[in-house]
Image: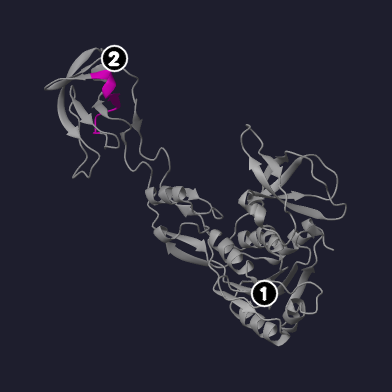
Amino acid sequence: MTPVSEALHAVLHAVKPLGNERLPLTRACGRVLAAPASSSHALPLFTQSAVDGYAVRHADIAAAPCALPLAQHIAAAAQLQPPQLAPGTAARILTGAMLPLGADTVLRQERCARGATGVRVLEAVAPGTDIRHEGEEIAAGAEVAAAGNRLTPGLIGALAMAGVSEVCVHRLPRISVLIGGDEVCAVGAPRALGQIPDANGPMVAAWLHGEGVAPQRLQHLPDHPEQVQRALAAAFADSDLVITTGGVSVGDHDYIPSSAEATGAQRLLWKVAQKPGMPLYVARHGNGLLFGLPGNPASVLTNLLVYVGCALSALQGVEPLLRWRRGELAAPVRRDASKTLWLRMAVDYSALGTPRLLPLGGQASHMLGNLAQAQALVEVPPMEGDDRVRWLPL
């Protein structure tokens, strides 16, 4: 069986980032930059006040306390022309408003006393106080975000402020999901004797939606080799990723590996030294990848998080290692001498520093009940080691 580290390497080696497309910034949340995004203008756009107060010439307040007549009011608004400040006067100015020509200092209103026609300066400040200078944050044309950054709401706000209206992003992967097994039926549908509700279809679709990708195809595969082969061929024709559940072990109705290879797929790996999820099958078909996941729900979830998640990151130009977090086992766990264990655990953030990971019961591959308490899928390597481990959020 292939060790987990080698299986992850094989997946990453097979993945190349997808092509690019340009999107309006307002439609790009969650997407990944395929090219740097640069500011179209300086930030701040103009020299402005950092506070509500009074714009002055520092020479006029050096002898504070003193009084200055109030010559004008400058709000944060469009201007027909740059405001100007006459010597020996002050201008009422609001946060973000354009600093008038001639002013070189802003007095916070707390340092002044406002009168009917003027302002009394109670104390002097250093020249240049509370001024935001044009371009002090970002120069025009400067890179705001590098390729590989995912566009979060905050980053979209920063790009909008920098005058970016359109971005170049990796296109989303086209994904087909094929759920195998005559024993499963749709949730809520009448069940024949011996059938069980389909947990895998809703779970895979929900996980993909959480990753920002909607499957373009979600269908059931009967346990029939010709139909499996036809469905795989159709999925390979228009998908970057094909995800199947069930049919990858050594049972009489496990047709995924043979059917995929009959369509021209090239096997990359089959059977990983892990529990749950050992009979993982990965193959390449043209530029697409097939992830043949075992049918047990916990095995499906494990392989989605570890391997499909790794591929989704790499397809969109994101470093897959960023998915992992570090933690410390709160209690000893029994290790397997030859396999990596993937255990669902709760996370305790109550102590400062490293999160503590709490083992849960019900870890069998057909069980999902502990997901009501679990927040982490924890990697427990086969060799003896300390209590520091890496994990993926559930």
Judge whether 333 appears above or below 4 on screen.
Answer: above
Mark 2 residue element: loop
Give the magenta-colored segment's residue range.
Answer: 100-112
Give the answer, above or below, for where 181 lies relative to 128: below
At label 2, the amino acid type is: Glu
Residue matched to label 2: 123
Among the 4 quarters of the image, the one containing residue 267: bottom right
Looking at the image, which is closer to me, 116 or 46?
116
Front position in the image: 113 or 246: 246
Is 294 situated left or right of 89 in this image? right
Question: Viewed as shown, does residue 90 lie left or right of 181?
Answer: left
**Residue 195, label in figure:** 1
Q: Would you call the spot at circle 1 few (<14 residues within 10 Å), some (14-19), or many (20 or more)?
A: few
Task: Quote the CA–CA distance across marks 2 and 1.
Answer: 83 Å
Q: Residue furthest bottom?
A: 226
| Image position of 23 (left or right of 85) | right
**Residue 350 sits in which quadrant?**
top right
Mark 2 or mark 1: which is in front? 1
State the mark number for residue 61.
Answer: none
The type of residue carrying mark 1 is Gln
